[in-house]
Image (cartoon, grey):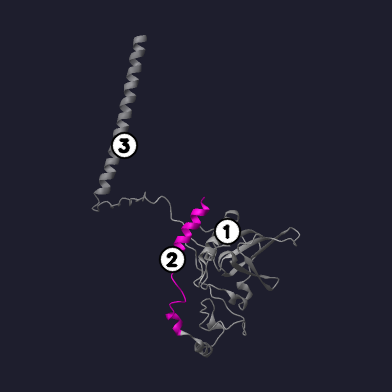
């Protein structure tokens, strides 16, 4: 009985093996027929190009960061004492080790916190657009403007003042002009910013964007004749506030010889590079 049961089990196993082999042969036969019919329709199969290789430059480990030298580090053109500016640079670097002075330009939106002994919280925070940067060395200043309760408010800050507590850049950008004092004569909407404004992130490897906006002005009279060529204003819509005859009349005060004045501006690239290396070396200590 035991021998017959073993034989029956072997027969059943061989039958299952034959069925599985037939099933696999059927699948192989069906796929080969399908491929043959797909290729035998008279149209060649569509060529799929391989993916492009990605070339990685191992010599460049990371994206290059923006290099920015604050303008107060560059000495003016006129006769100056180099020892005086060298000593001031050391004081400015020591101050920057304590206070984080970020990169910003005319047209950037800043929030400045100052120590105010007359305030209830002993702190005073103001938010506005930077309309001017002036001064050299420790006397560097910047001016913020905002509209508060329908009234234009401007505050001039000393950049290296010991009362300066915190400087936050909420929106880093440039404008078409290096001076935005004409916002005093522009519509209030161009100088109005919410005090609860959230910061706009900009990577340190991206270029600083230039805001191409051109403001609309209030009816004349203005604080200055911004249409005259000596101001060289690019951010005002003069076509909406002045007639062509008025613009032609403003050209009478043009000074075309200014573009040939070689002493008005000078190349500061070599000075900037030298001072930038000195500042970075001192801050990294």
Q: Where is residue 276 in the image (x, y as percent from the top left)?
A: 48, 59
Q: Residue 243, relative to residue 92: is it above or below? A: below
Q: What element carries label 2?
A: helix
- As drawn, the label of residue 269 is 2
Observer-side mark, 1 or 2, equals 1
Depth check, front residue: 111 or 230: 230
Decide which of tag 2 and tag 3 comes sooner along the chain. Answer: 3
- As drawn, the label of residue 91 is 1
Q: Where is residue 167 in the image (x, y as percent from the top left)?
A: 61, 60
Q: Which residue is drawn at 36% across and 13% down?
A: 5
* Image position of 40 (left or right of 1): left
Tell me how far mark 2 sits from mark 3, CA to CA: 75 Å
Decide which of tag 1 and tag 2 comes sooner along the chain. Answer: 1
Depth check, front residue: 72 or 119: 72
Q: Residue 16, relative to residue 255: is it above or below? A: above
Observer-side mark, 3 or 1, equals 1
Circle 1 packing at 10 Å, graded few (<14), some (14-19), many (20+), is some
Q: Where is residue 122 in the image (x, y as percent from the top left)?
A: 73, 58
Q: Give the range drawn in magenta.
A: 256-285
């Amino acid at each position: 009985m035991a021998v017959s049961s073993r034989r029956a089990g072997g027969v059943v196993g061989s039958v299952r093996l034959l069925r599985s082999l037939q099933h696999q042969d059927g699948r192989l036969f069906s796929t080969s027929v399908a491929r043959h019919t797909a290729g035998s329709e008279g149209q060649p199969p569509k060529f799929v190009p391989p993916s492009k290789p990605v070339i990685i430059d191992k010599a460049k480990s990371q994206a290059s960061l923006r290099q920015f030298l604050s303008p107060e580090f560059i000495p003016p053109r006129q006769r100056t004492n180099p020892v005086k500016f060298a000593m001031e640079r050391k004081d400015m670097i020591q101050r920057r080790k304590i206070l984080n002075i970020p990169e910003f330009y005319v047209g950037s939106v800043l929030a400045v916190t100052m120590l105010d002994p007359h305030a209830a919280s002993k702190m005073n925070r103001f938010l506005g657009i930077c309309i001017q940067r002036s001064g050299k060395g420790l006397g560097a200043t910047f001016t913020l403007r905002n509209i508060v309760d329908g009234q234009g408010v401007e505050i001039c800050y000393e950049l290296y003042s010991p009362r300066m507590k915190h400087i936050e850049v909420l929106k880093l950008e440039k404008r078409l002009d290096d001076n935005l004092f004409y916002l005093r004569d522009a519509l209030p909407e161009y100088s109005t910013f919410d005090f609860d404004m959230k910061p706009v992130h900009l990577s340190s490897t991206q270029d600083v964007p230039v805001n191409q906006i051109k403001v609309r002005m209030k009816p004349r009279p203005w604080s200055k004749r911004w249409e005259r060529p000596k101001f060289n204003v690019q951010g005002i819509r003069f076509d909406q506030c002045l007639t062509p005859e008025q613009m032609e009349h403003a050209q009478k005060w043009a000074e075309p010889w200014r573009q040939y004045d070689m002493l008005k501006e000078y190349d500061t690239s070599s000075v900037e590079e030298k001072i930038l290396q000195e500042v970075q070396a001192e801050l990294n200590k």
